Image: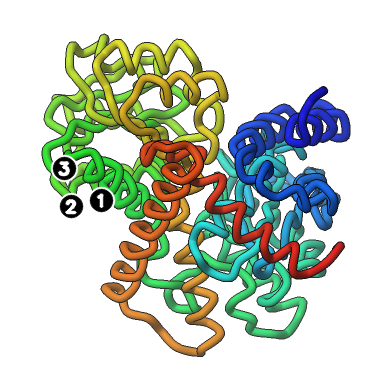
């Protein structure tokens, strides 16, 4: 007979048919929790895992707006409020054409554990829309954001639920969303959204926080295994906000970044994406709105563009050795054949940057064949940690300084790494069992809070 964890996973799949990404993350997280759950039979008695996989609340809504041609457009809007056990719901909004409940729910579920790992008082939630901002005019994006907020404002608030950005939602979208929230409610609730612009409550350093945090986490992984980040050859995917912050911090710490990628293929730069000009160019590529990375090779002719390929085979394609791969683009970007190519090429470290960038079987293969694998919910938690600092800044009617934010973020990333490594050591006898350790360390705090708060 299946054990408690296996039964909850199966039941969750039945209760949420077709939501494959959600099934994937529930399976990955819950199976890590087996040794903890065994020590706590009371969790089963109070259906703690069944409650955890069921969002406290979910809203789906119609978003109606008019495009530049005067045509009426209808999109779907979502907000899943997963867990408020340790704080108000917190998590980004994703605008992308493939958004459906399975994606928002996988992100919202992950967010519970990520936010808990930060050590800060934030619960888990996520939202978004199937709206595609690529190729839309500024005015269209504004009208869409206004229509989206016209429903969302009922469900959020500085002590209720605090959305932020994610794929397709950056400073521009947050600005339009905030403007509409303020117009409807007649309140300057700075802390209702994070990732705001600097003039109206945004936090200095928030834009690069996710990428900076990823590299600080990766640095701890290397250090724990007697290595240093300086001089390491690193390959990443994506060229958006997370990739840019990662590139910038790799440059600051003296590592050599050799790839970025887009839906059109990947760039290999043998000299490294390591100058101020090259790092800043990533921002230009993104803001062009074309969602392609090929122009990098026109601007910097030493670089080579591999059309239609992912950077996971760069070791074979370019005859080099990569010390660490960091996927920074999207979910399920790294499949089994990619994981095998990474290991065969000699790579020993792998750190997730994007949310759930690795399929479950590829992740398992990398965990078995690398020295250390850093999980996204720990490595990319610096973004949401700084969001929480932004909430504190807004609540205190003050402004924090850049250097203070960096110092706090660096300490938070070290704490997160230690929490993962310690839980890995305690339950799996291995300080490099960071994937399981992150799930356990994130879970323990939430479980304790849920037990204290009764059957809600
Ligand atoms: N979307 C980001 C994440 O995946 C940031 C969320 C936030 O700042 O609330 O963690």
Position in image of residue 384 (x %, y %): 51, 60
Is residue 431 visible in this depiction of the protein? yes
Seen in the image, is 284 located left or right of residue 169? left
At horizontal 65% and vertical 63% (from top left) the residue drawn is 123
Tag shown at residue 249: 1
Which quarter shows the N terminus? top right
Position in image of residue 116 (x %, y %): 57, 59
Seen in the image, is 57 located left or right of residue 392? right
Q: Which residue is mark 3?
A: 228
Q: Earlier in the sequence, mark 1 or mark 3?
A: 3
Q: Which residue is mark 2?
A: 252
The local crowd at label 2, few if under 14, some if 14 to 19, many if 20 or more residues have their Cα within 10 Å, is some
Callout 2–callout 1 Cβ contact below 8 Å: yes
Tag shown at residue 178: none
The local crowd at label 1, few if under 14, some if 14 to 19, many if 20 or more residues have their Cα within 10 Å, is many
Secondary structure under badge 3? loop
């Amino acid at each position: 007979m299946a054990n408690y964890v296996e039964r909850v996973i199966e039941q969750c799949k039945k209760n949420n048919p077709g939501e494959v990404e959600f099934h994937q993350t529930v399976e990955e997280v819950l199976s890590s929790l087996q040794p903890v759950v065994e020590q706590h039979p009371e969790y089963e008695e109070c259906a703690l895992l069944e409650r955890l996989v069921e969002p406290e609340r979910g809203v789906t809504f119609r978003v109606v707006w008019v495009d530049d041609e005067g045509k009426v457009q209808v999109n779907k809007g979502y907000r899943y409020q997963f867990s408020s056990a340790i704080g108000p719901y917190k998590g980004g909004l994703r605008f992308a054409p493939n958004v459906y409940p399975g994606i928002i729910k996988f992100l919202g579920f992950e967010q519970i554990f990520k936010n808990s790992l930060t050590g800060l008082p934030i619960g888990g939630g996520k939202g978004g829309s199937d709206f595609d901002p690529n190729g839309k005019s500024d005015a269209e994006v504004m009208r869409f954001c206004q229509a989206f907020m016209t429903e969302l404002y009922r469900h959020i608030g500085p002590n209720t639920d605090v959305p932020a950005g994610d794929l397709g939602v950056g400073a521009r979208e947050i600005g339009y969303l905030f403007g509409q929230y303020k117009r409807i409610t007649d309140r300057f609730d700075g802390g209702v959204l994070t990732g705001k612009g600097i003039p109206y409550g945004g936090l200095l350093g928030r834009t690069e926080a996710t990428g900076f945090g990823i590299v600080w986490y990766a640095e701890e992984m290397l250090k724990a295994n007697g290595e240093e980040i300086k001089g390491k050859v690193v390959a990443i995917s994506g060229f958006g906000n997370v990739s840019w912050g990662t590139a910038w911090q790799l440059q600051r710490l003296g590592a050599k970044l050799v790839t970025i990628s887009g839906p059109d293929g990947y760039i290999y730069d043998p000299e490294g994406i390591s100058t101020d000009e090259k790092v800043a160019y990533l921002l230009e590529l993104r803001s062009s709105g074309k969602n392609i990375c090929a122009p990098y090779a026109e601007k910097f002719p030493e670089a080579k563009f591999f059309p239609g390929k992912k950077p996971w085979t760069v070791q074979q394609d370019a005859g080099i050795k990569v010390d660490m791969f960091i996927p920074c683009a999207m979910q399920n970007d790294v499949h089994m054949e990619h994981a095998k190519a990474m290991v065969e090429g000699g790579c020993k470290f792998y750190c997730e940057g994007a949310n759930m960038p690795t399929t479950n079987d590829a992740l398992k293969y990398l965990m078995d064949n690398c020295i250390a694998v850093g999980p996204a919910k720990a490595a990319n938690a610096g973004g949401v940690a700084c969001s929480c600092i932004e909430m504190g800044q807004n609540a205190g009617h003050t402004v924090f300084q850049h250097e203070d934010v960096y110092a706090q973020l660096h300490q938070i990333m070290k704490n997160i790494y230690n929490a993962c490594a310690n839980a890995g050591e305690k339950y799996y006898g291995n300080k490099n069992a960071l994937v399981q350790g992150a799930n356990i360390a994130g879970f323990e705090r939430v479980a304790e809070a849920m037990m204290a708060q009764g059957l809600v």
